[in-house]
Image (tube, helix red, strand yellow):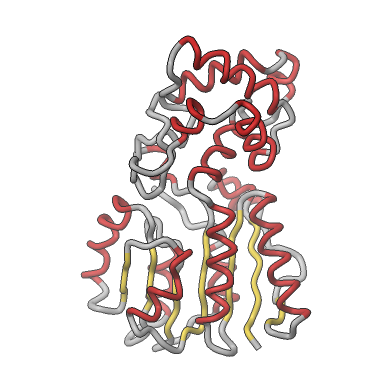
């Protein structure tokens, strides 16, 4: 089961009151959404977006439970403004982005998000294999391009060696599965490096491919701009990020908008999970929450 990260802190900053309206830009398995819906009863509404068609389908069962107060749409938050206008959703007092990958994606989706299971390297949240997949990147992209992706999005210092090994291996056979990729990374890295790493040696490669394939950083920039447009004055934007590339985008966005006197930053430093939360939910360890209020 997916445990919502920084739930108490999110509710403290959002401060949802009865009959207010909010947006959950990343519904996932509904952890944050449910806690917000409980606070805004009896008539407050929550517009929720979920890019993954399977998670969306699961969430539809929850929609019935909240009798019209939960409006769930199968959309990417890069289309946030569009969805808000289409639903004629007004007086938005807060928008939440939780950028973490859900436990379901890692444990049940079967799309190659994790190196712990042998799965096809699809790595798409929207499940649309007619669009770019990690298989396409690994088998069709030039070696230099793959190196750039690993360096830029995974901050992988052995990007060149790994890209070279990928190019070498794909000549022998097509790279289709997670375990194939793990073996390639293992071959490319010095043994001393594998032993030295605190995290699994393939983590950065998987992260880089996932970010690139799903256009995560571009979508985040889009989503933040649109959130600022649609949120009411006095409304808040909260973002939970899980790696430095995301956090940097959020930090710079809020800073820039504060300079322009459009928002006031509510978190001088990002809020991180307590030791107790990390103990209960290991995946929360890299979470950072930043928030701003629209002036």
Return the residue nearer the eye: 233 or 279.
Answer: 233
**259 relative to 249, above or below:** below
**120 relative to 270, above or below:** above
Is 259 positioned to the left or the right of 239 in the image? right
**92 relative to 208, above or below:** below
Q: Percent from the top left, x then y, of residue 208?
A: 59, 39
Identify the residue shown where x is 38% and y is 69%.
Answer: 48
Identify the residue shown where x is 68% and y is 63%.
Answer: 271
Return the residue nearer the eye: 67 or 130.
Answer: 130
Identify the residue shown where x is 76% and y is 65%.
Answer: 269
> Outermost residue, top direction?
172
Residue 21's image quarter? bottom left
Q: Percent from the top left, x then y, of residue 288?
A: 65, 58
Return the residue nearer the eye: 228 or 44.
Answer: 228
Is 49 positioned to the left or the right of 274 in the image? left
Identify the residue shown where x is 45% and y is 89%.
Answer: 91
Count of numbered circles in the view? 0
Q: Percent from the top left, x then y, of residue 86?
A: 33, 79
Q: Percent from the top left, x then y, of residue 92?
A: 47, 84
- The quadrant the C terminus occupies is bottom right
Return the residue nearer the eye: 198 or 157.
Answer: 157
**86 relative to 234, above or below:** above
């Amino acid at each position: 089961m997916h445990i919502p990260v920084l739930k108490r802190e999110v509710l403290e900053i959002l401060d949802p009151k009865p009959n207010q309206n909010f947006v959950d830009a990343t519904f996932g398995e509904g952890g944050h959404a449910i806690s917000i819906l409980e606070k805004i009863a009896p008539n407050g509404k929550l517009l929720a977006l979920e890019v993954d068609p399977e998670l969306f389908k699961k969430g539809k069962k929850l929609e019935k439970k909240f009798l019209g107060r939960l409006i769930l749409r199968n959309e990417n938050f890069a289309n946030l403004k569009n969805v808000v206008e289409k639903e004629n959703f007004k007086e938005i007092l807060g928008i939440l982005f939780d950028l973490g990958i859900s436990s379901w994606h890692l444990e049940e989706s079967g799309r190659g998000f994790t190196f712990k299971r042998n799965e096809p390297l699809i790595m798409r949240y929207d499940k649309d294999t007619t669009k770019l997949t990690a298989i396409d990147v690994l088998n069709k992209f030039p070696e230099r391009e793959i190196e750039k992706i690993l360096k830029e999005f995974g901050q992988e210092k052995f990007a060149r060696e790994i890209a070279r090994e990928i190019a070498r291996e794909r000549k022998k056979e097509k790279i289709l599965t997670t375990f194939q990729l793990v073996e390639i990374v293992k071959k490319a890295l010095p043994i001393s490096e594998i032993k030295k790493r605190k995290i699994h040696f393939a983590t950065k490669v998987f992260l880089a491919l996932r970010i690139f394939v799903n256009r995560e950083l571009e979508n985040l920039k889009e989503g933040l701009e649109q959130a600022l447009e649609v949120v009411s004055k006095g409304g808040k934007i909260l973002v939970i990020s899980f790696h430095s590339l995301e956090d940097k985008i959020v930090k710079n966005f809020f800073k820039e908008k504060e300079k322009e006197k459009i928002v006031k930053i509510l978190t001088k430093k990002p809020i991180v999970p307590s030791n107790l939360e990390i103990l209960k939910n290991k995946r929360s360890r890299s979470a950072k929450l930043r928030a701003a209020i629209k002036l």
